[in-house]
Image: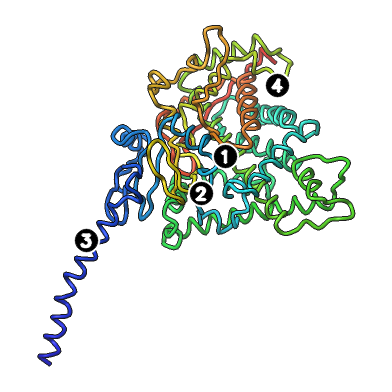
Amino acid sequence: MLLEAVSYFLSWFWSIPVLFALLVISTIQWWKYPHPRFPPGPRGLPFIGVISFVSEQPNKKVYEWSKQYGPMFSIKLLNQSVVLLTTYEVIQDAFTKHGSVMSDRPDIPLLSQVSNRNSIIEQNYNETFKMHRRNGNKIFKGLENTKASMEKVTMEEAGYLVNYLKQYCGKPIDIKFPIYHATANSVSQVALSKRFVYNHKGFQKIIDSSVAMTEDPTFGKKIFAIIGIPLLRHIPPFRSANQQYVKRTKEIYDFIQEQIDEHIETLDPDNVQDFIDIYLVENHISKTQKNLDFEANADLRGFIKDLFTAGIETVSITINWAIVTLLHYPEIQAKIQQELDSVVGSDEKIRPDHRKSLPYACAFLEEVMRYHTISPLGAPHLTSADVELSDFYIPKNTMIQAHIWAVHHDPKNWPGPDKFDPLRHIDGDGNFVSSKKVLPFSVGPRRCLGENLARIEMFLFIATILKHFHVLPDSGKSLPPLHMGIHGLFYSPFSFEVVLQERSSLI
């Protein structure tokens, strides 16, 4: 018995230095960079990295680090090193000049568990991606002469939006929801050649999914955490958020599949109507050949899902931030309306080609996209090969993040960056100047494919609302915060209501 006790004590005693040695080795490995010339940066704490150092204002923390370590630095997230790019010049160099080797995507289990990476947003930068992007551009161009052209459907939807909002004049309304529906219907008409009433059951699932991702702070933060730490999706309370995401996403895919099947059955190759029709014709579907192979079907379904996700969430959130800004700056609202009144007739619909005659309205939207950076870190990139960038060495399979917020708030680009000022986008002759340093759609080979549709939607919806209404705050409540929002998948404003007053003298 005594010998057994001594033996047990010795085994436990000798395990102490072993455990200590393992801890020392782990810590050394933690602090070790992947390469001697790897970008420096904060390593944080062993096993968790910098997570505990990121506050409720992560953008400002990353900006502080960039001042300490330079425009390109690395951070440690769990066991992964991530390189952050914080100036326009470095981002341009990485994603444009070195775009061929810095444009892959890391696998994000939250997304791929449903999509199987059959999504142009998730695909690596390979020949398949390039083919899909070429086809996407070709299809968008092919839509120009159909009833699903981006300009036509968005102008039409802007009219529906105004008619809906007129019902609520004079009383508080959460304007975010009709805006979500309007942007979703614009995408739907381009993709499906269909417009849905605002309470359509299947269509509502797409809206609900977008709203949950962007308007529910708790759900949004959990999803954001799962993206950064995939293991969390198996652990309560993140597991329920993951299950909710999967359920909602599958419902959207099922809805899209129903639309694809219907299009296959009714396709007339001589009279294509929308994105799906053109895609089917490109894949040799006809009145007699109605079998779309599994891979092509999955790609199409992922493509349409991307259109809805990007077209609804990013556009709607930008419009919502624009409205919040107008509540804080009524003088800017009045100036836009004055410009609209001088250019657009009282009975005339606002068209995309009015933009060239409405420089202040365009400058306002450009400043909204700069000031309220809804995707502060953009979508993650992954190196597909070893690469040298700005005297640093970045190994293959390193995650790269462009800190768009830092570019948008760099005083070298924007004097007084914390001031909202549309005039910084107007030249000496009074013309609107689109800045290459406003990057809501990224740069390089992965620049947003739907940028043109997004810009048309934002302009037409905001301009049409301001043509018909004064947008006023709810007198019974304080103004929604201008400098604070919800950090989820996107950076969105807190819930708010407005009171619309019809500009009847113009109608």
| Figure coloring | rainbow
Mark-to-mark CA distance, 4 and 3:
66 Å
> Closest to the observer: 186 or 281?
281
- In the picture of the structure, the residue carrying the numbered disc 2 is 384
> Where, quadrant-wise, is the N terminus in this rendering?
bottom left
Query: Dot 1 corresponds to which residue?
Result: 446
**Residue carrying label 4:** 351
Query: What residue lies at 62% left-to-right and 21% top-to-bottom?
Result: 463
| Residue depth check, mark 4 versus mark 1: number of the one nearer the observer | 1
Q: Is residue 495 visible?
A: no
Q: Secondary structure at mark 3?
A: helix
Q: Which residue is mark 3?
A: 24
Inspect the image, locate mark 3, and give the three-letter code of the amino acid beneath it. Answer: Val
Circle 4 or circle 3, nearest the eye: 3
What is the spatial separation of the Cα atoms under label 3 and label 1, in whole angstroms? 41 Å
Quadrant assignment, res 351: top right
As drawn, the residue found furthest toward the bottom would be: 1
